[in-house]
Image (cartoon, rainbow, N blue to C red):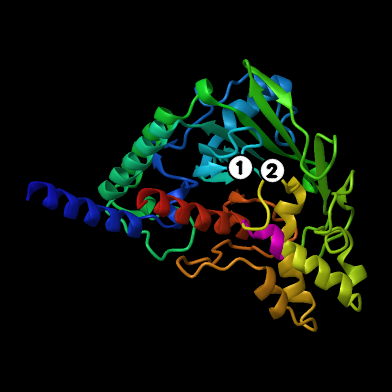
Amino acid sequence: MKHFAFVILTLSFSLITHAAWDLNDVSYVMPLQVQEDGHVNTLPLKGLIPEKIFERISPIAMDMDPRDNVRAMRVVAMRIDPCFPYPTQISCQKQLRLVWQPLLQWEEDGSIDAVDAALHSFYPLTDAEFDSLLQELQVWKKRTGVETRGLPLGPHPAWKSGRGVAALKDLNRIILKYAGERNLSRVTAMFLRGGGAMWLFGAFEFKNGELVTMTIPRLGKNTAQSFVNVVTSGDVFSGGGIAGARAAGDDTLSNLVAESQRVRTGNEDVIRKELAAAYKIENPKSYNPENMDCVSCHVAQTARLWVDRKRKDIANQDIAAQFGYLNPAYNLANVSDEPWHTQQLRALGYHNKKISISQRAINESAEVADAINRYLNK
């Protein structure tokens, strides 16, 4: 009888667990500003990324030397993943990942701006560590007393609860328990250049305490990729587009994001082909970070939304139905302030004071939530 009761209790907990994991349970967008005694409570680099890497890589943001970068860099998001497609014999790696941006605090009013540049750090976990992390996150969520089910991905609702500062500090302690220089495996970077009109991407493995440059998927032996858009209005693409080596494969966006005025009329076949590519690039069932180049992934959303806004003459419902990502279990709405802005390349974080989340990050979060629900209920 006791064994039967235990089985029933276990099944009940399993069903509760399945219902609990939603988008904001796997991707955590930190508050841009939660203060206590005048201090921003998001995590700095110390203990998570070696400061010496800024001597190895260029400054992340314009007008910042390595010391400024170290001082300003803060965690703006955390992601967990039960199966990152690691390109080794492991092939499926459990991870915790952190998204970083330089945060600048203004003396006049104490407000915070996020610089449009970023690091993304990767921390592999053992099976036991990942299971423990999931358990601690469940306990953390219960303690905050907030509901995440059915919410779109955005700043976590815990920050607006009565325990906002305490909840963030508790989550910071969890991060520091499972991530650190000891298990750092990779760092990817988005550098801001060209007066704010050029974004440079690179990736580095962290081996034996040193950074080793990685090649970028679809670009052969190239280790860097850049994107240029000099129009600040956010209505068009102009000034260069995807620079450097051309990505291999059919799914490219080179026409839409170079000089969009050239495809403002006509060119239906070109637009439909690249629109299909954008939908596929945003779909984690079609591409993953190991087989898609950086720029294409970061500009797919704005390319797609440019077509929605500027080429209403092109019927695209069939393209969306065929190649777009669908998952009715979650709210896939995008809460970004200006997701259509053609200089908006952020995947998960902030642009100045505005929340900026890509549809790709939302779709990936849905896939991860599904994977964790299956993992916990198997």
Residue found 75% across the figure and 60% down from its top: 342
Name the side, left or right, on which 174 lies relative to 196: left
Vertical arrangement, residue 376 with respect to residue 173, above or below: below
For residue 17: magenta? no
Identify the mark nearer the N-term, 1 or 2: 1
**Residue 277: image tag:** none
Marks 1/2 in contact by CB < 8 Å: the verdict is yes
Q: Disc 1 marks which amino acid? A: Pro
Vertical arrangement, residue 198 with respect to residue 252, above or below: above
Element at badge 1?
Answer: loop
For residue 283: magenta? yes
Q: Can residue 27 be seen in this view?
A: yes
Magenta residues span: 279-284
Element at badge 2?
Answer: loop
Q: Residue furthest left?
A: 1
Q: Is residue 358 visible?
A: no
Vertical arrangement, residue 151 with respect to residue 123, above or below: below
Residue found 46% across the figure and 54% down from its top: 369
- The residue tagged 1 is 85
Q: Disc 2 marks which amino acid? A: Glu
**Which residue is more in the foreground, 138 or 39?**
138
- The residue tagged 2 is 290
Q: How crowded is mark 1: few (under 14 residues within 10 Å), some or many (20 or more)?
A: some
